[in-house]
Structures are given as structure tokens and as C-alpha cells.
Image (cartoon, rainbow, N blue to C red):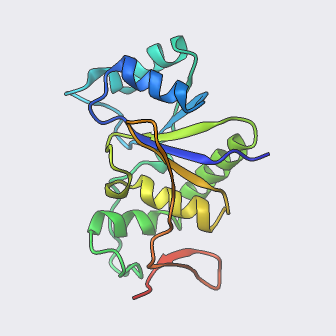
Amino acid sequence: MTHPLITVGHGTLSQQEFAALLKTAGIVELVDVRRFPGSRRHPHFSREALTDWLPAAGIRYRWEERLGGRRRLPPESPDVWWQVDAFRAYAAHMRTPEFQDAMTTLTTQLEVSRLAVMCSESVWWRCHRRLIADFAAKVCEIPVRHLAHNGRLTEHAVAPGARLSTTGSLVYDLA
């Protein structure tokens, strides 16, 4: 049985609040999808700190740089539905072997573990987790839920501009 993919943003939560949120949602593994996994304001969410305290809380931690955001926008991007260049750049990154290999690893893990992908942004639709969720739902056909800080899990709705190309790639070019 494949578990749904859960996405979560750490935001301003304390270490204790975040661990409790993950435990309540049944998360046993956290995959960090920040390209640069550090936080000056919230040092307990640095990669080094998470490597220490999450396993102590009973949750496995793994950094997955290949799913990280902050990508360069290629000159010829078909993803015209996105108005934010950072999202257009990430959409292009999703068509790379690097990203697709990372998603294969992630979907394989979902067959055995209830895991969440994490970034810093609390609100999923303002984060590249939104595009990861689109890929998981549309390409991998895996259900996706977004975990809010109040514990609510919301079902993901794929962006209306998304479609699968004839080659099976996810593009955002619908008006």
C-alpha cells in the first residue's frame, strides 16, 4: 500500500510543536526539501539540528537536495501559466533526471513509510512543495495531503494550468 505524500512547512513552530504535529499526523520520516537547509531565525530547523533532535523524537530525517527550490529559470520555459519566476524555474527543474530520480526514491519510500516533505514556508501554495505535490499527484498518481499547523490535512488540488505532455512531462501551459 502506498501512503499519501504529506507536505509541511515548519514556519515559526518550536521544536516541540513541530515534533508533536508530525507525531499526531503519523509521520515517521521527514524529507527536507530545502535547497539550503538552515534558518538563522529558527536554528532548531537547521539540517544539523534536525539530524540530532528528530531521531530523538522518533522521526527519521533525510535531506533531499535534488528536490530543493531556488532554481534558475531557463530562457525557453513552456510554463507560462506560472506568473512567479521562481515557480516557473522549479517547474523546469521537475523535467530534469535529477528531480525525477529523487521523486522515484520518494515514491518508493512511500510504499513502506508515512513520510512528509518539509520546507520552511508554512503555506503550501506559496512554496515549491506545491509543485512537488502536483508532480506526485499528476505524474506519479499518488494522493497528496498538506499538513497545516493546526493538524488539519487538506487534499491537494493540482494547479489548473498543469497538464501532461505527450512525452509524459508535467508542463504548466494551460490558460
Give the total number of marks visible in the rendering: 0
Left or right: 129 in relation to 106: left
Where on the picture, by quarter, is residue 36? top left
Tell me which residue sits at (52%, 11%) in the image: 56
In the image, residue 30 above or below residue 107: above
Q: Quadrant of the C terminus?
A: bottom left
In the image, residue 62 above or below residue 125: above
Where on the picture, by quarter, is residue 19? top left
In the orientation shown, which residue stands out farthest toward the left?
Answer: 41
Residue 97 can be seen in this image: no
Q: Residue 28 in the image: state x and y as whole percent.
A: 61, 27
Q: Residue 64 in the image: state x and y as whole percent.
A: 51, 40
In the orientation shown, which residue stands out farthest toward the right?
Answer: 1
Q: Residue 16 in the image: state x and y as whole percent.
A: 38, 17
Q: Nearer the viewer, residue 76 or 151?
A: 151
In the orientation shown, which residue stands out farthest toward the bottom?
Answer: 175
Left or right: 112 in relation to 24: right
Where on the picture, by quarter, is residue 99? bottom right
Q: Residue 51 in the image: state x and y as whole percent.
A: 47, 20
Left or right: 113 in relation to 14: right
Tell me which residue sits at (30%, 36%) in the image: 11
Q: Quadrant of the N terminus?
A: top right
In the image, residue 169 above or below residue 9: below
In the image, residue 58 above or below residue 23: above
Residue 90 can be seen in this image: yes
Tell me which residue sits at (40%, 62%) in the image: 90
Q: Nearer the viewer, residue 109 or 16?
A: 16
Q: Nearer the viewer, residue 150 or 114?
A: 150
